[in-house]
Amino acid sequence: MTLQQTLESQIINAVEKLYGVTLQNIELQATRKDFEGDITAVVFPMLRVIKGNPVQIGEAIGNYLVENVAEIEKFNVVQGFLNIVLSDSYYLNFFQSVKDFSSFGKVSEGAEALMVEYSSPNTNKPLHLGHVRNVLLGFSVSEIEKAAGKKVYKTQIINDRGIHICKSMLAWKKFGNEETPETANLKGDKLVGNYYVKFDQEYKKEIEALKAEGKTEEEAKSQAPLILEAQEMLRKWEANDADTVALWNKMNGWVYSGFDKTYKAIGVDFDFNYYESNTYLLGKDIIEEGLKKEVFFMKDDGSVWCDLTEEGLDEKLVLRSDGTAVYMTQDLGTAVQRIKDHPEVTGMIYTVGNEQDYHFKVLFLILKKLGYSWAENLFHLSYGMVDLPSGKMKSREGTVVDADDLINQMTATARKISEELGKIDDFSQDEKEALYRMIGLGALKYYILKVDPKKRILFNPEESVDFQGNTGPFIQYTYARIQSILRKTGALPTTLKLAAFKLHAKEKELIKIIQQYPETIQLAAANYSPALIANYTYDLVKEFNSFYQNVPILATDNEAEKAFRVQLSAAVGEIIKSAFSLLGIEVPERM
């Protein structure tokens, strides 16, 4: 039984014994900072069944708790709030009961399985800053769900077909002169991305030329030779034309190799991939099934729709009149296929930007109407865009912030700031470079993940690498400080003499925050929010630094105190490392 359950039970007992009535609910909350106490029982709701003065009721219940609950040392009543002070022995017993703080808060894998989709890039351009937020969110949520006891499959669907892919292919064919990533000394995804930009530049020239001949904007866009050739290339690909498919395979191979390098650099991975070229024909059998169940209806032109007006939405097209699929058809088919591939999966999380909110609302609703039980456990991890001080990014115009360039910029910023601080002169050059990369990536990841996913982010690289405040480097530095303390200590006793000292208020506050870690993991998993883990870690680090500044750790003459404080510091270090691993962030032993 947890302490909260014990208190609730004993308060109910107290009220029955003192007043002869039964309470159904007890409201407990953390005691406000300006009052003495650890847990507060709110008396006011009890007045519905107990008649009397709230202060006197609080006093009577407080006296009963002191007599009957060993963990309670004393209490005070402020108006209708019963502030309960827990004994030092309660906190010390808790601390000693945790055998391994590196696994503290994490739950063993259970039967429930989830699939988390993230990244899902197009193969016509390299990954950019927007993808970075996506992959960091998806990967972190996967790790948090695992820590909360779920079996997790990490996946992506790669958008490797369509007119946008043909644009890159056509531009390379017309202007590439057989250039390859090797001859250009360029990552394959960057090379292909350059030809996507090249297509747009040449396409615009053709549009302007046609407009000069008297064509309207729309006529020029639809009649430009390049777009007509790209459309023809798409038709050839769909007809399985050998040369077109060979070029598609070659250029996509370049892109996949480039993506893999970027994913490795960012520190994310996948258990398996789906490809749109394999899934775009899925879903048509589901449309047939939905027509039989009358979930869908056919219009006079032969197109198939789902009527969602009763749910406050509109009619949604699920199959065109010529029998070709739309994105919704494919997404229905892919969702069903994933469950066929992994029948133990009971829910899915889609990490996709908030411009697709409506699409996923409709997708989930249709899957529920079709009667799939797992459709009740689908979640759209919707997130806001990432902006830079220079403004919005546009892929076609080549103004995106490339993910690889961003990682290099973050590393360079970390190098500059670290060299100014001058605390790593004894590091080898390789050690320095590894540290700069760890700090730079930690800064980037933390800056993005500490924000609620739904909020838009204005990303400032310099601000993110600050060694003070709510930043990744500040937390990494605190972890390194703790490791320095541990290196200075010899062998200390592992069994503490609990009666040998009294807890300092700072020690008690630190243990209180440590106790919140398991609950924070579960809360972050339930809300699909890495921000809860990030900000918990910052609160823990702030409290540790306050403890470090106010309480002598190695300087105390009391050996029992020294042993406890070193162990407490080590526990904080383990939780920082654990929490940061859930965010995909590494921590340095020295800094």
Image: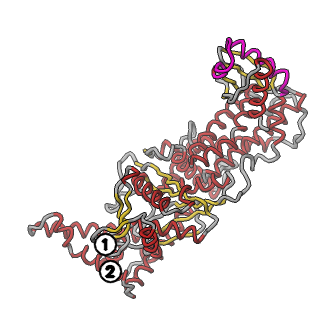
Give the residue displayed 27% in from the left and 71% down from the top: 301
Find residue 225 and report its horizontal and vertical position in percent.
21, 76
Between residue 542 and residue 221, name the one nearer to us: 221
Circle 2 packing at 10 Å, graded few (<14), some (14-19), many (20+), is: some
Residue 367 disc label: none
Q: Which residues are magenta?
A: 45-70
Under circle 1, the secondary element is loop
Give the residue displayed 25% in from the left and 73% down from the top: 227
Three-letter code, disc 2: Arg
Where is mark 1, residue-wise?
302
Q: Residue 281 falls in which quadrant of the image? A: bottom left
Where is mark 2, residue-wise?
235
Residue 129 visible in image:
no
Left or right: residue 223 compared with residue 484: left
- Quadrant of the rendering where the N terminus is positioned: top right
Is 48 a magenta residue?
A: yes
Find residue 354 and report its horizontal and vertical position in percent.
42, 51
Residue 456 visible in image:
yes
